[in-house]
Image: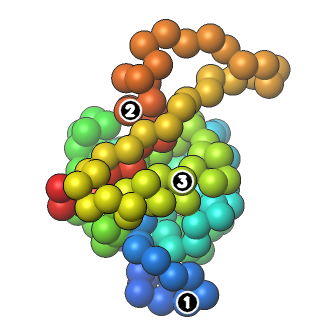
Amino acid sequence: MGPSAAVSAIDPASANRRATGALVSIVIPCYKQARFLADAIESALAQTYRTIEIVVVNDGSPDETAAVAARYPPVRYIEQDNAGLAAARNTGLANSCGEFVVFLDADDRLLRDAIQTNVDRLTADEAVAFVAGLSYYIASDGSPLPTDQHFMQCCWRGTASARRHA
């Protein structure tokens, strides 16, 4: 792949003219997860909180990540050589503009009100820099799976939102 290059982009200031409130950047790193990516993007687009930008970072994945992202014109798509999850998240952070940031793994989904709930709590108190919600693990048949270490899972599995400058 070569150096990072935005394949498609949106202007965050005009991305959602009917929206109000602080911009939330939803960064979706993706490596060999193209088969799940559409669900992640659609869950981000379905948010009740509308002032969002979505940044998909293809971390050198050899699958159809680019083709999946291209089906969603509001998505900013960035390609980079494979450098790992942390580097892909950092690339997404560097190429996003939101006051608040959510890292959503490509194989995860957000509940429709996840961003609204997190923004409400973050904006209620300037001293709050980080919030997280519960994660639900779902089997391929749709049944819920049990999980342990729930707090740490929530912090790292797409339910957390943080201020960009805390």
Looking at the rendered structure, the secondary structure element under dot 3 is helix
Residue on which disc 1 sits: 17
Q: Is 52 left or right of 161, judged from the image as shown?
A: right
Residue on which disc 3 sits: 117
Q: Earlier in the sequence, mark 2 or mark 3?
A: 3
Whole-percent x, y for residue 117 in the image = 54, 53
Residue nearest the viewer, comparing 82 with 74? 74
Q: Quadrant of residue 69?
A: bottom right
The three-letter code of the residue at mark 2 reads: Trp
* Residue occupying the far right of the picture: 141
Looking at the rendered structure, the secondary structure element under dot 2 is helix
The three-letter code of the residue at mark 1 reads: Arg
Q: Residue at x 45, y 30 (%)?
A: 154
Q: Is 124 left or right of 3, judged from the image as shown?
A: right
Whole-percent x, y for residue 43 in the image = 65, 52
Residue on which disc 2 sits: 156
Examine the rendered structure and indicate whether residue 110 appears above or below residue 27.
above
Examine the rendered structure and indicate whether residue 75 appears above or below residue 62.
below
The three-letter code of the residue at mark 3 reads: Thr
Whole-percent x, y for residue 116 in the image = 55, 59
Q: Residue at x 41, y 87 (%)?
A: 13
Mark 1 to mark 3 CA distance (whole Å): 21 Å
Looking at the rendered structure, the secondary structure element under dot 1 is loop
The answer, for residue 36, to whether it is visible in the render is: yes
2 and 1 marks in contact (CB < 8 Å)? no
Q: Residue at x 80, y 24 (%)?
A: 142
